[in-house]
Structures are given as C-alpha cells and as structure tokens.
C-alpha cells in the first residue's frame, strides 16, 4: 500500500495507523495512587526522552477519562508488561471492570501500584503534560527503575505479540554498544 502526499491534510488516518502498526511497541500499564483509589491505564506509546536528566514520556487520547485522573498525580509507575500479561493489557485498556483485580500488586516507592512479574518498572515524578494533536503527552522524571529477565509483551500490526527467543541473541556492534542491556 502506498500513500501519495499532495498536501499535509490528505493523509488517510486508517492508512497511517496501518503503516505505523508495522512498528512494534512495548505494552505498559501506567499506575498511580489517586485520591479515590488506584488509577491505571494501558499505553503503547512509552518512549525514552533523555538520560540526563532521566526522562520518559507516554501519550493518551485527550478524551481519556483515566488520563484526566493520571495527569493530576505527582508520581506514577510505568509497568512494562511481560509477555504473559496480555490479560492485564486488555483489562487496563477497558473503561469498566475491576482493573486491579488482575495480577498481583504491591506498592512501589511512590505508593503507586506495581504489578508483580513485569519486565520493568519505571517510577516517575510528573514533569509536564503537553498537547500532541488529538493526544496528550505526559513526561516523567525517572526516580527509580528496576527490571526483570521477563521478556516484554509487544504490540505489532494490531495484535499482542511475543519476541521470538532467537531475537534476543547477542550481535556484535560498535554503533549500539551504548545501548548495553
């Protein structure tokens, strides 16, 4: 499928979504301790912003009820889901239901809920909330980070996916040595 660009306004949103769906993304659940109890939502837009200072960001629809609550908290935890946590992805993407009945939870340093068995946990202090088209972004300053050996859950071409075990082999390189895991 190709797309011809005559002007900035001729991009078909569904074609753009399908093209961008070819980019695998991590699946995370962002959580916080709200005034009325725990808050959480699934995001597939986590990105590293800076290592000095340590900043990350994620995006949500501007109309999201859960994001309306999350954007007011001072601290939040990004739970990077492991490949066996697909049910949690769907549960936290839903508007209804007892989200925190899925999985085993504990409190992290900032009192935000942290799910047991995730691939990584990134605790943040809210740095800013900003407009990004029909979405809002939230940038956080990383205050604490941990990771496990669990492989991450991946979203690709509209479906939850798993990395192939062979995809994690070591490849000798000089250009990516800075990204040592």
Image (cartoon, rainbow, N blue to C red):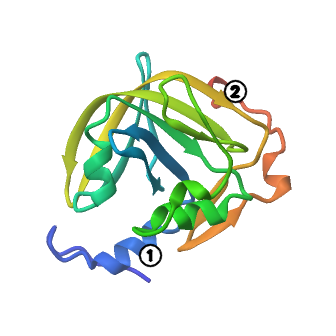
Q: Residue 80 location, x and y as percent? A: 59, 45
Q: For this view, does 13 lie left or right of residue 133?
A: right
Residue 26 can be seen, yes or no? no
| Residue at image location 24% in from the left, 75% down from the top | 11
Residue 166, visible in the rendered structure: yes
Q: According to the image, label 2 marks what residue?
A: 180
Q: Earlier in the sequence, mark 1 or mark 2?
A: 1
- Find disc 1 in the rendering and name its residue: 18
Residue nearest the viewer, comparing 56 with 35: 35
Residue 7: percent from left, percent from top:
14, 71
Q: Position of residue 122 (x, y in %)?
A: 54, 32
Mark 2, other Cα within 10 Å: few <14 / some 14–19 / many ≥20: few
Indicate whether 91 appears above or below 145: below
Residue at horizontal 16 percent and vertical 67 percent from the top: 8
Q: CA distance from mark 1 to mark 2?
A: 31 Å
Q: Secondary structure at mark 1?
A: helix
- Residue at point 72%, 57% (across, down): 83
């Amino acid at each position: 499928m190709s797309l011809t660009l005559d002007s900035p306004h001729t991009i078909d949103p569904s074609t753009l979504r399908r093209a961008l769906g070819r980019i695998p993304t991590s699946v995370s659940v962002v959580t916080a301790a709200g005034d009325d109890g725990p808050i959480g939502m699934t995001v597939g837009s986590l990105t590293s912003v800076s290592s000095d200072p340590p900043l990350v960001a994620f995006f949500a629809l501007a109309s999201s009820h859960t994001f309306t609550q999350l954007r007011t908290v001072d601290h939040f935890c990004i739970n990077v889901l492991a490949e066996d946590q697909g049910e949690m992805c769907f549960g936290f993407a839903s508007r209804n239901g007892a989200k925190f009945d899925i999985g085993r939870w504990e409190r992290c340093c900032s009192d935000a809920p942290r799910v047991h068995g995730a691939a990584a946990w990134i605790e943040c202090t809210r740095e800013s909330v900003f407009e990004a088209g029909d979405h809002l972004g939230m940038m956080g300053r990383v205050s604490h980070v941990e990771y496990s050996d669990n492989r991450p859950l991946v979203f690709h071409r509209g479906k939850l996916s798993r990395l192939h075990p062979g995809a994690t082999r070591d490849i000798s390189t000089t250009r990516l040595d800075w990204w040592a895991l």
